[in-house]
Amino acid sequence: MTTDGLKDLNRGNAGDFIGECAVKHSCEPCMKSNISKTATVFFDSCNEYLCDSCKNPHMVYKPGKHNIVGYLNIVEMKGMDRCLEHNKKIKFYCHVHSNLCCTACLIANGKYGQLEEIDSVPEIKLTHIDDLKHSLIKLDSDADLIIAESKQQDSDLNKSVSKVNEELDAIHIRILKLVKEAQNNVLSEANAFKSEEINRRYAICTQVKEDLHKILTIGSAIAERGTPQQKYIISKRMEENKNIIQAEQVTPHIRCRLQES
């Protein structure tokens, strides 16, 4: 486990209620040697808890300014004094953006306006502890309400989406049914038209053939011995049948007539 992991584990023993923020901490250098000793001081500048035995060597061998906070004066912030984005200690408050920020925030985001240095702010007197508890409970209740509303909205949205899908499925089924009915109607009408047209042409041509056979059987006799009136009638009969056959020959193909209809 890394040093940071040991620190997080050691500092995670604090209670969850107000009044339990002052907790016991083990000396971090001793923990690395599997020795359990209670820390007596906190080096704020180094963010380390040390016992009396490790305090002096730390100050001698670790360069830089050491800001020592007495153990009894330590209040565990549970990570709330560190930047959420960079995990560095909060140093400033930007009044323009209403953000707590660390030095890395200034480098990453460029200009910040109306910065206030945390170390130089005057001491703020908090409201009575009971009022603070009530405020926190109220905020927690409001958060629960928002979560419940969000879950309900998500459930309502899922139901709406499901209902829309059901309606679309029903519309799709109705459209398919209408298309099938239209297809059946077209096929039925086409078959009826086809049968009617074929039967009509068959009947006409059959009648013409019968007339032609009759003419052939008496044509030679009328040509030789028939009266002028008989010859005239036979001639016109032949002309009529010829016109009928020619009319059927120029009649559009059944498929074309179906497409036109």
Image: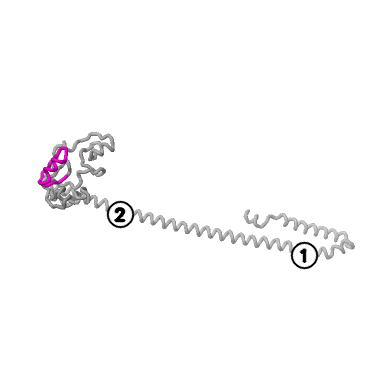
Between 226 and 100, the one nearer to me in the picture: 100
Secondary structure found at label 2 = helix
The amino acid type, in three-letter code, at marker 2 is: Gln
Between 222 and 179, the one nearer to me in the picture: 179
Q: Nearer the viewer, mark 2 or mark 1?
A: 2
Q: In the image, is residue 28 part of the stretch drawn in magenta?
A: no
Between 104 and 201, the one nearer to me in the picture: 104
Color theme of the render: one colour
Q: Residue at x 12, y 43 (%)?
A: 57
Q: Position of residue 9 (x, y in %)?
A: 19, 51
Q: Position of residue 256 (x, y in %)?
A: 65, 55
Find the distance from the CA under tag 2 to the CA under tag 1: 86 Å
Secondary structure found at label 1 = helix
The residue that label 2 is drawn on is 152
Packing grade of label 1 (10 A; few <14, some 14-19, many >=20) is: few
Q: Which quadrant holds the C terminus?
A: bottom right
Q: In the image, is residue 53 part of the stretch drawn in magenta?
A: yes
Left or right relative to 53: residue 202: right
State whether residue 179 is above or below residue 99. Answer: below
Q: Position of residue 127 (x, y in %)?
A: 13, 44
Left or right relative to 147: residue 229: right
Question: Is tag 2's residue or tag 1's residue first in the polypeptide sequence?
Answer: 2
Q: Residue at x 74, y 62 (%)?
A: 205
Report the residue that reaches farthest toward the right. 225
Left or right relative to 189: residue 128: left
Q: Position of residue 230 (x, y in %)?
A: 85, 61
The amino acid type, in three-letter code, at marker 1 is: Glu
The residue that label 1 is drawn on is 210
Q: Residue at x 59, y 60 (%)?
A: 187
Q: Tell me where the magenta segment starts and ends, as one range.
A: 48-72
State whether residue 205 is above or below residue 33. Answer: below
